[in-house]
Amino acid sequence: MKSLSNLLSFVRVAEAQSFVQASNVLGLSTSALSKAVARLEADLGVKLFHRTTRSISLTFDGVRFYEGCQQLLGELDALEAEIQGNRAAPKGRLTVSVPPAFGRVCLVPILKAFTQMFPDMTLDISMDDRHVDLAEQAVDVVIRTGQLNDSANLIASQLVTYPLVVCGSPTYFEQHPKPQHPEQLQQHSCLNFRNRATGRIYPWSFTQARKVERYAVSGSVVFDNADAIVRSTIAGLGLSQMPGFLAAEAIENGNLVEVLNIYRPLEVPVWICYLDRRLVAPRIRSFVEFTAAQKEVFTLICNCS
């Protein structure tokens, strides 16, 4: 590559989808910007843009080259930030994706301390159950629960584990006997959770004779929101299997009663992940290290024994 400035010119035009808008961002004339992109195309020997009198769009090669340029410029920014990090505190915008229930109950309580420690950083937190592709969706850090199926390009650290517990309200058990075995769940109204991203209903899991057994249970209501399940269980609508951190407070104050605790499945791991790169931006490293240091806090929140 003969000129980094030509590469930057291409990236800004691709982002703006306009030579005029990109020229305003870079402080260059439209003519100079067009010549820079033309030189880049000549160097590469490929056409990067489809051009008409009214619009421009990336070619197939242009899309692939733009993705690579984003990664390259990101690593340059990370290198600059790493060098400057010896003299300055982490700063900038950090994008984080976290499951809603864990985010609300476990992550939110530690955010004030983080923002006080790193006042020059801005957190952009998305709480949803989608499976996020960090590279494709430009997410810096993701918190995931369960087994990691795509960890090849990720650096992952385990934050905590939490139990899955089956609960019902005292009012529910005034009208129904407590189940003594998972098979008896067929005699109860069970509240199921549907994953909003996949549309699948989660089976209930139990450990029997050191083996994990999964049950498809039935009931009159299915939710795609964990908080709604907790509130409905407290209201006596039925039994539910939920993360321990969602049940802990209600169990402690007597609004929920755990059953089948001797059949609890293996605890669910929670991971904090970021892309495997040679250069990790200080803003990413600071958040990951701070969050990983909160294991005792997370364990306390998740414990419902």
Image (cartoon, grey):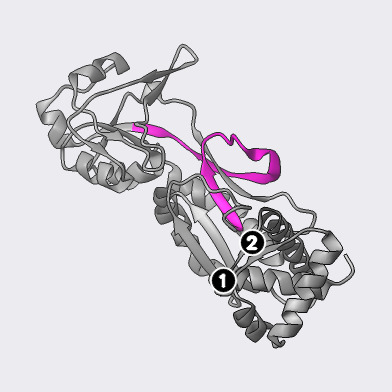
Residue 301 in the image, given as x and y percentages of width and height: 44, 49
Look at discs 1 and 2 and give the one toward the viewer: 1
Which residue is farthest left? Answer: 175
What stretch of residues is rendered in magenta?
Answer: 139-165
Q: Which of 27 and 139 is in front in this view?
A: 27
- Looking at the rendering, in which quadrant would you find the C terminus? top left
Local secondary structure at mark 1: loop
Residue 142 in the image, given as x and y percentages of width and height: 56, 51
Residue 258 in the image, given as x and y percentages of width and height: 30, 32
Which residue is farthest front? Answer: 53
Q: Distance between the residues labelled 1 and 2?
A: 11 Å
Tag 1–tag 2 contact (CB < 8 Å) = no
Q: Nearer the viewer, residue 201 or 295?
A: 201
Task: Name which residue lies at 66% across and 73% down.
Answer: 13
Local secondary structure at mark 2: strand
Q: In this view, does 55 lie to the left or right of 79?
A: left
Q: In this view, does 175 lie to the left or right of 182?
A: left
Examine the structure image and report whether residue 143 is included in the region drawn in magenta. Answer: yes
Residue 85 seen in render: no
The residue beneath circle 2 is 58
Residue 154 in the image, given as x and y percentages of width and height: 67, 45
> Can you say whether 266 is above or below 194 in the image?
above
Q: In which quarter of the image is residue 191?
A: top left
The residue beneath circle 1 is 55
Give the amino acid at mark 1: Ser
Examine the structure image and report whether residue 211 is included in the region drawn in magenta. Answer: no
Task: Name which residue lies at 61% across and 77% down.
Answer: 120
> Can you say whether 89 is above or below 269 in the image?
below
Q: In this view, does 59 lie to the left or right of 254?
A: right
Q: Nearer the viewer, residue 60 or 223?
A: 60
Q: In which quarter of the image is residue 240?
A: top left
Task: Name which residue lies at 56% across and 62% down.
Answer: 95
